[in-house]
Amino acid sequence: LPISTIHLHPPPSVFVSSNTCSCDCPAMSASTGPRELRLDFAGCSYRWFDVDEMMKVHGSSLTDTLTEDIMQYFKVPLQYQVLCDVEGPLTSSTDLRRVLLGVAPRLWLFDARYMGASLRKQCEQRMEGLGRELGFTRSRLGLLLPSSTALGMQAPPSDLSPSGPEHDGTSPRKLLPW
């Protein structure tokens, strides 16, 4: 089978821990063994798969495969999946990848069709906060300003890429990893 059709087998197993932690923090599941994804859904906690092993197999498509497998194992269609981490709702595949790269990857899965009003409100408030943060970042980058020169500000240079002996000057050099 092509890698894109390989699913994350076996199905998740119910999480049982000999450790007890009154705060139920993510660090509780951290150990010297493999980094297993812990996923909480409908009152149960599951240890699903070794994240490092699955990253080797699936690479950058792991996030897509994970959301597809959530449909299969938990019967939550993609359009109703609300995935959260300790900070709140995940809004992009980049957020999901960041969680998977963490020391003790843990997700909370909710089905939007059955979310209680209180939980829905918490998610909405967190997403509004993320929207404000995004707006602040866009402002700092000058992406919301119609023209910085119209406001009396000096326009930023058109090419922020440094030139140097390893740069030929004909194309901008990539400064960030993305």
Image (cartoon, helix red, strand yellow):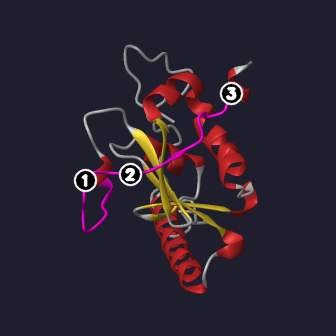
Which one is nearer the viewer's eye here, 72 or 57? 72
Instruction: Give the foreground label among 1 and 3.
Output: 1
Q: Earlier in the sequence, mark 3 or mark 2?
A: 3
Q: Is residue 97 visible?
A: yes
Q: In the rendered view, would you say 46 is above or below 139?
A: above
Can you identify the residue that label 2 sits on? 16
Q: Amino acid at mark 2?
A: Val
* Label 2: which secondary element: loop
Q: Amino acid at mark 1?
A: Asn
Report the side of 41 relative to 153 (left or right).
Answer: right
Residue corresponding to mark 1 = 19
Q: Is residue 154 above or below residue 35?
A: below
Amino acid type, callout 3: Ile
Judged by depth in the image, the label closer to the viewer, 3 or 2, is 2
- Residue at 37 percent of width and 37 percent of height: 35
Magenta part of the protein: which range? 7-26
- Secondary structure mostly seen in the magenta stretch: loop
Give the CA separation, mark 1 to mark 3. 33 Å
Q: Residues within 10 Å of mark 2 (few under 14, many from 20)?
A: few
